[in-house]
Image (spheres, rainbow, N blue to C red):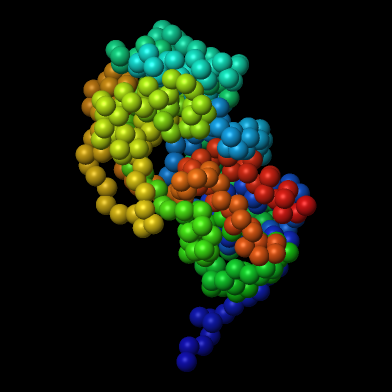
Amino acid sequence: MTSGPLLARSSDSADLVIVGAGIVGLAHAVEAVRRGLSVVVVERDDRAVGASVRNFGHGCFTAQGGQALQYAMAARPAWIRLAKEAGFWLRESGTVVVARAEDERAVLEELRESRGDQVEMLDRDDVEARLPIGADVIGGAWLPQDIRVDPREAVHMIAAWLRAQGVRFRWATTALAIEPGLVRTSRGDVSADHVIVAVGHDVDRHFPGLADEAGVVRCALQMLRVAAPGDRVIDPAVLSGFSLLRYGGFEECPSLPAVKERLAADHPDLVAAGLNLMFTQRPDGDLTIGDTHTYGRTVDPFTFESLDQAILGQIASLLGCGPLTVRERWQGVYASSPDRDFLIEAAGPGVRVVSVTSGVGMTTALGLAQDVLGGLLG
């Protein structure tokens, strides 16, 4: 029989226990601190290593639609305030959406008509003043409200700031059972008045029925970090015509079907791979570029070099530069649902299961948490 330290267990209590220390879990901890609650965060790893650190660090607010747009706009001032408090790098850099065809420019004009001063149209010279561009770029649009952070820094600094506010973290601790008022973990029990389960795509590990009902699967992305051509500083985030197919804000634009039809005819393999051709620049000057999308309950761990080469070629063409130097490659994974952007469900009295099921966790989490906790706490 095993005895001694291996069996050491402890108990803890708080107003709120959060399972998951990614950006969605941390956003709920931030909101709980704002409301004066005591908080315990349970995280299976010893730091956040999932989708919250593998993304573009792009607060893509204006391109959202529906509920995602509401959460995004609530998240924007929360990000700016939190960056000042926690001390992480944030740029109110906006986004340039590059148009390389007239139908893409038409979509951007239609977005401007619906969003007013949230969108400013750009001609080719305006775009070129902001970033290096290829010969086929004809113009674009400027979305001034968008922001950028370094996701590899921001999530960890938010956790550090929360610790300074009294939030207790149980790192490298697995949630074994989640019940109303109680989370049983590999290091002891945590009792609480309320429980938030923010485990992203792993919601099916804890509540498979909820995941099945919502059609939650995993979405795998191929992403890369490359050296910026000519060491150029590119302040805004940059989206492309492929991006118009990925964000809800463009869905009601009358010209979008023409863009879909043309891209599907010209680049069937890239459209089939769900390419969102975009990039952001890291504080060190390198570019984070991507990304493709594949879906499944269990994702294949193997990536395709052909897709990486396609991404590299498309980015080089957009920037009008030669071959790009790759620094890193990785696979991102997030939760996805075919019919909703967010999974917010009660799993018992005082227990809420919360996942962003549309790939916009960094953009929306700080607004989403305000809504979820407002409802949970009445």
Foreground residue, 354 or 282?
Answer: 354
Residue 314 point in image, percent of width and height: 28, 27
- Residue 216 lies, in percent from the top left, at 47, 53
Q: Is residue 12 above or below residue 149?
A: below
Residue at 70% of width from left, 64% of height from top?
A: 349
x and y percentages locating residue 228 in the rendered image = 34, 27
Asked whether the viewer can see residue 327, the reply is no
Residue 55, image x and y in percent? 44, 41
49 displayed left or right of 298: right
The image quarter in which residue 168 lies:
bottom right
Q: Nearer the viewer, residue 152 or 25?
A: 25
> Is 273 left, or right, of 173 in this rendering?
left
In terms of image quadrants, where is residue 313?
A: top left
> For the point 40% across and 48% down, which residue is it?
219
Residue at image point 63% right, 73% down: 189
Tell which of 316 and 159 is nearer to you.
Answer: 316
User: In percent of the image, x 40 and y 9: which residue is there?
Assistant: 124
